[in-house]
Structure formats: C-alpha cells, structure tokens
Image (tube, grey):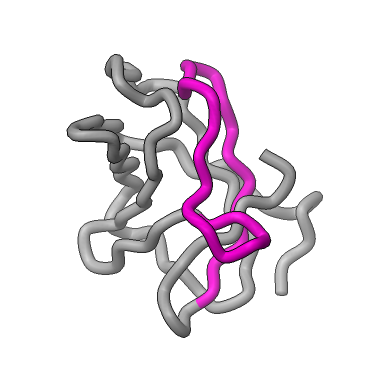
Amino acid sequence: MSCCCKTRIIPATSVTASNGAVTITVPATTEFLDGNLYKIGLFTSAIPDGTDNATISITNGTTTAFVMNDLANYFRRPPLRGRTVLTLRYFGDPSHFLAWGC
C-alpha cells in the first residue's frame, strides 16, 4: 500500500460528461493496483458542463471503475473544476475507487 505522502499526481488526459455521468481518462500506462492510493489531477483537461452531482468513473483505457463513497453508493460531488485533485483508493473486487477525503 502506498502512503499519501509518496503518491504522485496522475494528470487526467480528458474529462467528458454525458447524461449525468462523468468519465475521467488517465494515461494508458497507469496501472491500478488493489489497495493503492491515487491522486488524479484535473489540470490540463477542459472540464465540461454537467459535472454537478454526476457519477464519476475513471479509466485508463483497459480498466474502468466507478468512484464510490464509504457507504458503497456512487460518489457525487459539486461540479468538478480545473486544478482539482481527487484522492482515491482503488479496490479490485469489484473494480471501484473509494473517495478518500475528496
């Protein structure tokens, strides 16, 4: 397991929103490992309208996982904005991210 102080920020390559769902794409070289902490930076991506109270999924092109809260519900947050960092822990069974202090 990685420590939050050693976790590097992974820049999102794109953010899309459609029908109440947001998909954040990270580089294909990003490997999601069970139990690891990830910081996803929304720095270079244009943030589209329609991110308010939407479900969020993150993909590297191979693995796609929804972001959940600690009650096992879809994590919904106020609108995403540029220069935001999402801190998430990945779990592989079933594939999902847990919002970690977002």
Q: Main secondary structure of the magenta part?
A: loop
Look at the picture and state if 57 lies above or below 53.
Answer: below
Picture quarter with the C terminus = top right
Q: Is residue 42 magenta?
A: no
Look at the picture and state if 49 lies above or below 96.
Answer: above
Name the residue nearer the viewer: 13 or 23. Answer: 23
Question: Where residue 70 sits: x, y (%)?
Answer: 67, 60
Question: Where residue 33 sits: x, y (%)?
Answer: 51, 75
Q: Residue at x 30, y 32 (%)?
A: 15
Question: Where residue 7 sits: x, y (%)?
Answer: 68, 53
Q: Residue at x 19, y 34 (%)?
A: 19
Image side of residue 8 versus residue 1, left or right? left
Image side of residue 17 versus residue 37, left or right? left
Seen as rendered, the residue at the extreme bottom is 93
Q: Is residue 73 magenta?
A: yes
Picture quarter with the N terminus = bottom right
Q: Residue at x 37, y 25 (%)?
A: 51
Question: Where residue 87 sits: x, y (%)?
Answer: 63, 46
**Residue bounds of the magenta highlight:** 68-91
Image side of residue 68 versus residue 5, left or right? left
Name the residue nearer the viewer: 95 or 73. Answer: 73
Q: How many marks?
A: 0
Q: Residue at x 61, y 62 (%)?
A: 89
Name the residue nearer the viewer: 89 or 32. Answer: 89
Name the residue nearer the viewer: 24 or 4. Answer: 24
Look at the picture and state if 49 lies above or below 24.
Answer: above
Image side of residue 9 versus residue 45, left or right? right
